[in-house]
Image (spheres, rainbow, N blue to C red):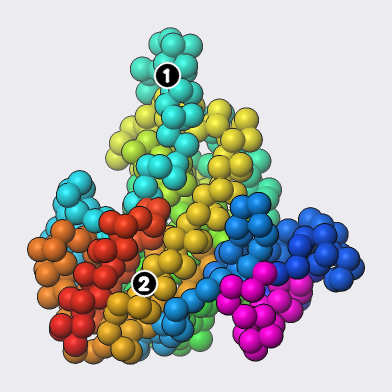
Amino acid sequence: MDTAHRSKLYEQVAERIGDAIATGTLRPGERLPSVRELSTRERVSISTVLQAYVHLESMGLVETRPQSGHYVRRRERPLPAEPQVSSRPPTTASPVSVSALVARVYRSASDPRMVPLGAGIPAAELLPTRRLNRELALLAREAGELAVAYDMPPGCPELRRQLARRALDWGCTLGADDFITTCGASEALHLSLLAVARTGDTIAIESPAYYGTLRAIEALGLRALEIPCHPRHGMEIEALEAVLAKRRVAAVLIVPSFSNPVGSCMPEVNRQRLVTLLAQHDVPLIEDDLYGDLHFGAERPRPCKAFDTDGRVLLCGSFSKTLAPGYRVGWVAPGRYRERVELLKFAQTVATPTLPQLAIARFLQGGGYDRHLRTLRRRVAAQVERMREAIAEHFPQGTCATRPTGNALLWVELPPTVDALILHERALEAGISIAPGPIFSAQARRYSHHIRLNCGHPWSPRIEAAMATLGSLARSLA
């Protein structure tokens, strides 16, 4: 049965309150029943009510006031509408050329004078930096010669064991030997592409697609075939099925959980359909699960790998968006391609740095990661909602923005007269870094009036002022 229809008890409670808010029965600023009152009224446990309130808070409908209780969140104006399904891309595969513009986006993002709304990098203050650094320092003293030795593929045994334990929570039956550690998810994706494709081959990807994926395809001399995506549900399976019926595709590369840049989350039933479809056509699936842990709801979505019965799915991920971007610790569970990926890993970078792997393994083992994730998810969800409110307040009429249920990114569709590249230039002049839409497609002028905004930094007067400035610049172009 489709999990979308198996509503959990806390979701039923949250839905009833959400309906009351939507119909105006509960008004902005109005105090909601206490946890105990609602527990009695709904005849559910206190923990169920708490889950319902957390869920409503992640949706931006409710706010918690310390020592006071839960309230309907105030809004000055309606939030922006959602974008439509991405426009139909060409049915032919295209060579990719986005590296120059992407490099400029990253240079601006690394400039401390810029307000960092461009590159999708989390703020250091959201991460357990001190705890990880203490672990790293302690390990450096304890590890002795191990600290400076190559950690040959498949990589750190302790970390791979922790990944295997976490995979059980994802719905995957994977052992430590099924994982290979990498230098971030970027290397995991790069190795996966090398393992399943040759120069000139076609890779089916989402549209819009993460520019890092496009750069990898470009670097390997591959061609990108873009498949339209729904802002909530991700890649349209019917469109992919039509493509596979007509032409050879070497692999499909997608981000099913909270895609970059759109933030879509593919329903579980679609994930099952996708795995079955690719098995029928003997096409491997490269699954980027980088954002799986950054879900705003109660449960992590099960990856496509959970439905893989013949090792056709290469599952990739890292800790760059949740723990330590600079540690560059990632992983891949490549299924039937394991031997080839391990050989390619050795040929590419020999090994993943040892100490960062050990530090993250220890952090996972002690339970610190799960505690950190609970706080991180709440903060990121709140930041996404504040950014959407700022778009509604400052951006030109007709602007649309996505409503992600995970991830720290917003995909913004501006009025057609707003040129995203010109807006990008003017924003840089104003000290604001953004990611212009054209870098998310192999087609040079696609998404020419779209931008992606990073919500990975705590809301502050500086970001608030930047959003007001960015909205003013967009209005001037409209």
Q: Indicate the position of residue 271 as horizontal and vertical percent values.
A: 59, 71
Name the front one of labels 2 and 1.
2
Is 356 left, or right, of 295 in this rendering?
A: left
Residue 415 seen? yes
Which quadrant of the structure image shows residue 471? bottom left
In-front residue for pair 118/282: 118
Residue that mark 2 sits on: 390
Which quadrant of the structure image shows residue 99? bottom left
In-front residue for pair 237/445: 445
Q: Does residue 30 belong to the magenta stretch?
A: yes
Q: Indicate the position of residue 51 as horizontal and vertical percent values.
A: 71, 60
Residue 102 marker = none
Residue 241 seen? no
**Highlighted magenta segment, given as a residue range:** 11-31
Q: Judging from the image, what secondary structure is the residue with disc 1 in? A: helix
User: Is 306 placed above or below 394 here?
Assistant: above
Q: Is the residue marked by circle 1 packed among few (<14), some (14-19), or many (20+) residues within 10 Å?
A: few
The three-letter amino acid code for the residue at tag 2 is Ala
Q: Does residue 360 belong to the magenta stretch?
A: no
Which quadrant of the structure image shows residue 79? bottom left
Residue that mark 1 sits on: 137
Q: Residue at x 41, y 72 (%)?
A: 388
The three-letter amino acid code for the residue at tag 1 is Ala
Q: On the rendered image, what quadrant is the N terminus found in?
A: bottom right
Q: On the rendered image, what quadrant is the C terminus found in?
A: bottom left
Q: Residue at x 31, y 36 (%)?
A: 349
- State how far apart marks 2 and 1 are (Cα): 41 Å
Q: Indicate the position of residue 312 as horizontal and vertical percent values.
A: 54, 60
Q: Judging from the image, what secondary structure is the residue with disc 2 in? A: helix
